[in-house]
Image: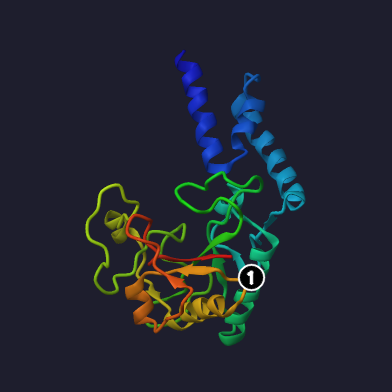
Amino acid sequence: MIRLVGHGLILLVLTVLTQLGGLAWLIALPFRRRWLVFPLAYGLIWGLAYVSAPLAGRVPLPCNGEVLRMQSPLYCVLMRQYVTPEMADLAQDTADIVAAAYPGTVTLALDGNFPFFDGMPLLPHVSHDDGEKLDFAYYYSDPDGTYLPGRTRSPVGYWAFEPVGADPCPPVWLTLRWDMGWLAPLFPDRRLEPGRTAALVNALLADPRTGKVFFEPPLATSLGLAHPRLRFQGCRAARHDDHVHVQL
C-alpha cells in the first residue's frame, strides 16, 4: 500500500511539473531498474512532444537563441516553454525590438505552457493554461551599471522582487502574493536595468497582438510606464515585480 501511494505521488508530481512526465513514469514502472528506464522514456516523450506539439497548436520557444531564449534549460527539460505560434511571434518580435534599441541584449523567457491541451494549469500560475500567456525575466546590470547579458538575480528568474515603492496591497488571507524574503540574501547583487526593461514592456504594449501586461504599479511608475493595457493583477495573485507577464 505504501509503495502504491509513493508511486501515485511520483506520478502526480511529474504530471503537475511537466504534464507528460507521469506517462514516462508509468512506462518505467514494470521494469526492475525503473530509475534507469525513466530518463530514457522521458527523453523519448520529450522528443515526440517537441516535434508533435505544432500539430496541437503549440510551438517551443528557443532554448539557446541569441536574441530570445529560455532563462534556464530547466524550463525546456520540464516542457514549460510551449506557447501558441502567435505568442511565439510576439515574443520574438519584442526581443528583436529591444535588441535593435540596445544591441547585444538577450531577452529571457520564463514559464509559457505545456505542449498539449488547453485548461491544464501550469502551477503555481493561475492563468498559464492555453499557451497564450508568457512571462519574461527582467534585465539586470552589475552594481556599476554594466548590463549583464542573459543573467538574472534568481536562478529561475522568479522571486527576486524589486523593492520599489510601498506595497499597494493590504494583508489578505488566501493569497499567492508571497514576498519570499528569506531568499533575497541568496541572490547576487544585480540591479534592475531600467532602459531595457521599460523598452520590453513598451514594445509589448505597442503591439496589437498584446491583450494585457501585468506589472506592479509602483515599479511601473518608477519606470515611467503607463498604458490602458498595463494592468495590476490583483492582491491575491502572485507578485509581478520580479517578471513581466504578457497575454494575447
Instruction: Give the residue drawn at x 40%, y 83%.
Output: 145
Q: Would you place residue 82 above or below residue 102 in this image?
A: above
Q: Quadrant of residue 165?
A: bottom left
Can residue 143 be seen from the camera position used here? no
- Percent across and percent down for residue 54 are 75, 53
Instruction: Looking at the picture, tell me which residue is in the foreground, 147 or 61.
Output: 61
Display colour scheme: rainbow
- Quarter-wise, where is residue 27 in the image? top right
**Which residue corresponds to the image point at 47% horizontal and 57% vertical from the top-left?**
156
Residue positioned 47% across, 12% down in the render: 1
Where does the image place residue 100, in percent across and percent down from the top left? 62, 85
**Is residue 194 placed above or below 81 in the rendered structure?**
below
What is the quadrant of the C terminus in the image? bottom right
Q: Is residue 234 left or right of residue 126?
A: left
Within-10-Å neighbours for mark 1: few <14, some 14–19, many 20+:
many
- Toward the bottom, the furthest residue is 101
Amino acid type, mark 1: Leu
- The total number of labels drawn is 1
Look at mark 1 in the image and give the residue it sits on.
90
What percent of the width, then of the height, locates residue 181?
27, 57
Residue furthest left in the image:
171
Q: Residue furthest front?
A: 228
Q: Quadrant of residue 190?
A: bottom left
Determine whether, in the image, residue 68 is placed left or right of residue 127: right
Label 1: element kind: helix
Q: Position of residue 76 (x, y in %)?
A: 61, 52
